[in-house]
Image (cartoon, helix red, strand yellow):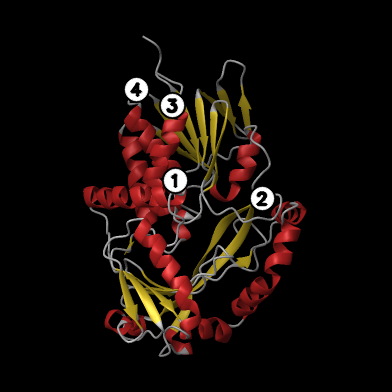
Amino acid sequence: MSAPSRIGVVGAGIVGLAVARRLAQLRPDARITVVDKEADVAVHQTGHNSGVVHAGLYYAPRSLKAGLCTRGRGLLREFCADHGLAYDECGKLVVARDEGEVPALREIERRATANGVPDLRWLPGVALREVEPEAVGAAALHSPRTAVVDFAAIARAMAGELRDKGHEVRLGFEVTGVRRNLDGGVAVCSAEEAFAVDRLVVCAGLHTDRVSRLAGDGPEPAIIPFRGEYYRLVPGRSGLVRGMIYPVPDPRFPFLGVHFTRRVSGSVDIGPNAVPAAAREGYTWGRVDLRDVWATASWPGVRPLARRYWRTELAEIRASLSKRRYLASAREFVPALRDDDVVRAPAGVRAQAVDRDGALVDDFRIHRVGSVVTVRNAPSPAATSALAIGEHVADLVLADRG
């Protein structure tokens, strides 16, 4: 009898853990090792997002994003039910501020319908207040099945499952080298140690381009970090918003703009914005990493990106530095919001993939290089889609194995 397969996964965020979990289901005889440089799971994007389980409103029908989001939402709901984790369908209202935004909102309705978003409703301006009494707008699209969860808690549950089945989640292991051997195996190295696997999956989030290159993948796309900053309603004013209030997104820009999100804890966050970060883990303005700054500045796609979006980014930076400007955007949807209704909340950093020509990569992008599969872009709704991404990637990993 042949020895069990050895499979490695770099990255203990929700996507990496979901991939490892699915591999463990498909190959119960395998030895799976998940490594991460941090001292806990879900430290970065998984632990710093808004907790929204997206229903599939925005995504181009038949895109990988749309399909994995729809499949992933159902799997995630089942996972939460099985593990006793909160899954709150508080609903989302996408609001057109004026008549000029109504055609774009109709396009979202078309996409959402094509993607099978359940129980979708179109609401004229007055009717939207039946859902969110403090909101204003020309029209709205209501998605009552959009939910919120604690993605970090879900990631911890996945890691626990893996350990219970005898697999390893090795923390404090920073990958500094990946060597593909002539026999098809892969050596995964840190500064102090190394281990060998037959197959490797790279789900390294903010550092996925660097680790993927170590494994022999190409340079494109590169990760450019954008910080998303939040305010939070003080407890006495959290009743201003019942669920989620979102803007109609600019289709030319991958960031949604400032919005309101109720969390499973009952608090309500306002944000995020999207400002360039001076470090891949740059959760504050004061965090600067010169290596990351150089990597961003030297990527050929940054110049065309800056030319295309400099006005938008200048407005984002001004709002970041001015609470008054930031809240003015939020007040377009909830006029009753006062400056003293909010306090600062923890920020997140988005791993925005950018191609050499400056194009912002919108869909999931997954490569295969011999015995290595690299997840090069996993933007929102990656957390929602994580269990479905796990299925998709696991199939790629095992495609040529018996």
Q: Residue at x 41, y 60 (%)?
A: 111
Q: Residue at x 65, y 35 (%)?
A: 214
Q: Mark 3 and mark 4: span between their CA atoms?
A: 13 Å
The crowding category of the residue bearing disc 2, from other C-alpha atoms within 10 Å (few below 14, some 14 to 19, many at least 20), is: some
Residue ID for mark 3: 398
- Three-letter amino acid code of the residue under disc 4: Asp
Instruction: Name the element at disc 1.
Output: helix
- Please report whichever mark, 2 or 3, sits nearer to the chain's N-terminal start: 2
- Three-letter amino acid code of the residue under disc 2: Asp
Report which quarter residue 335 is drawn in.
Answer: bottom left
Q: Nearer the viewer, mark 1 or mark 2?
A: 2
Instruction: Name the element at disc 3.
Output: loop
Q: Residue at x 51, y 54 (%)?
A: 379
Residue 362 is situated, as x and y percent measured from the top left of the image, at: 55, 54
Asked if disc 3 and disc 4 are in contact, CB closer than 8 Å, the reply is no
> Quadrant location of the C terminus?
top left
Q: Is residue 373 above or below residue 387?
A: above
Residue 15 is situated, as x and y percent measured from the top left of the image, at: 44, 45
Residue ID for mark 4: 29
Q: Residue at x 59, y 53 (%)?
A: 361
Q: Nearer the viewer, mark 2 or mark 4?
A: 2
Q: Mark 2 and mark 4: span between their CA atoms?
A: 39 Å
> Quadrant location of the N terminus?
top left
Residue ID for mark 2: 355
Residue 210 is situated, as x and y percent measured from the top left of the image, at: 64, 43
Q: Mark 1 and mark 2: span between their CA atoms?
A: 22 Å
Q: Nearer the viewer, mark 3 or mark 1?
A: 3
Instruction: Name the element at disc 4.
Output: loop
Q: Mark 1 and mark 4: span between their CA atoms?
A: 22 Å
Report which quarter residue 138 is drawn in.
Answer: bottom left
The crowding category of the residue bearing disc 1, from other C-alpha atoms within 10 Å (few below 14, some 14 to 19, many at least 20), is: many
